[in-house]
Image (tube, rainbow, N blue to C red):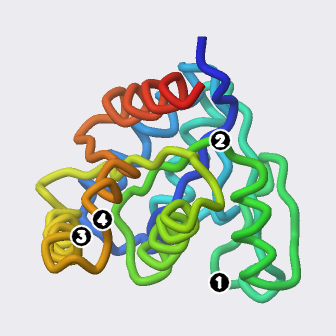
Amino acid sequence: MSSMKSICLYCGSSNDVDPKYLDLAVDLGKTIADRGYRLVYGGGSVGLMGASANSAHLAGGDVLGIMPKFLLSKERIFDLVEHRIVDTMHERKQMMFEESDAFIVLPGGIGTLEEAVEMLSWARLGLHSKPMAFLDVDGFWSPFFELMGHIVEDKFTPAEFLDLFSHATTPTQAIDSLETRIISLK
């Protein structure tokens, strides 16, 4: 049995993206709820963030949104779920980390990439062993995986680094990979 209770989601907050990304976010939110996990995310009601949270909420799932004050007007808090307001992005990221047992990264922009890379950096430094899965459609994250391979190939980080994350193309596959990693860490 997995000791995983909460999954942190990093993803885009734009509504102007291809609908396939929003559909993936909806599928992920529902799957997280159906599997009995709490969704921890950035608190917004827009973009993939809002789509996932709303989907998890509608499926009867537990959802926790965490948002810094300065983003309240930009990302519009999803007030149908539990949320916490913090002062800074650093507090947001720290609380999201503390409230989660694993991470899923959906397509997103520079903020999504920054959050994911920071968690990978912390794992590489031995600060945590929480698993991460990148979930995409049509190879969205392929350039990132290519860059990570290049970093390993040129010996800037050891090959074991690539074991810190997985790549999935369905929500079920992403959650399964997190569960497998959690169990293997016991």
Dot 3 or dot 4: first in sequence order is 3
Dot 3 or dot 1: first in sequence order is 1
Dot 4 or dot 1: first in sequence order is 1
Relative to residue 171, is residue 91 drawn left or right?
right
Number of the label disc, if any, that sits on residue 158: 4
Of 64 and 74, nearer the camera is: 64
Q: Amino acid at mark 1?
A: Lys
How crowded pointer 4 is (Cα within 10 Å; few <14, some 14-19, many 20+) is rated as few
Q: Residue 104: x percent and y percent?
A: 46, 49
Residue in the image at 54% along x and 65% along y: 119
Tell me the SS state at disc 2: loop
Which residue is the site of mark 3?
A: 148
Which quadrant holds residue 5?
Answer: top right
Q: Residue 83: x percent and y percent?
A: 83, 56
Which residue is the site of mark 2?
A: 101
Tell me the SS state at disc 1: helix
Q: Distance of mark 2 from mark 1, alpha carbons?
A: 28 Å
Which image quarter holds the C terminus? Answer: top right
How crowded pointer 3 is (Cα within 10 Å; few <14, some 14-19, many 20+) is rated as some
Q: Distance of mark 3 from mark 2, alpha carbons?
A: 23 Å
Q: Residue 55: x percent and y percent?
A: 54, 39
Residue in the image at 23% along x and 41% along y: 169
Relative to residue 80, is residue 75 drawn left or right?
left
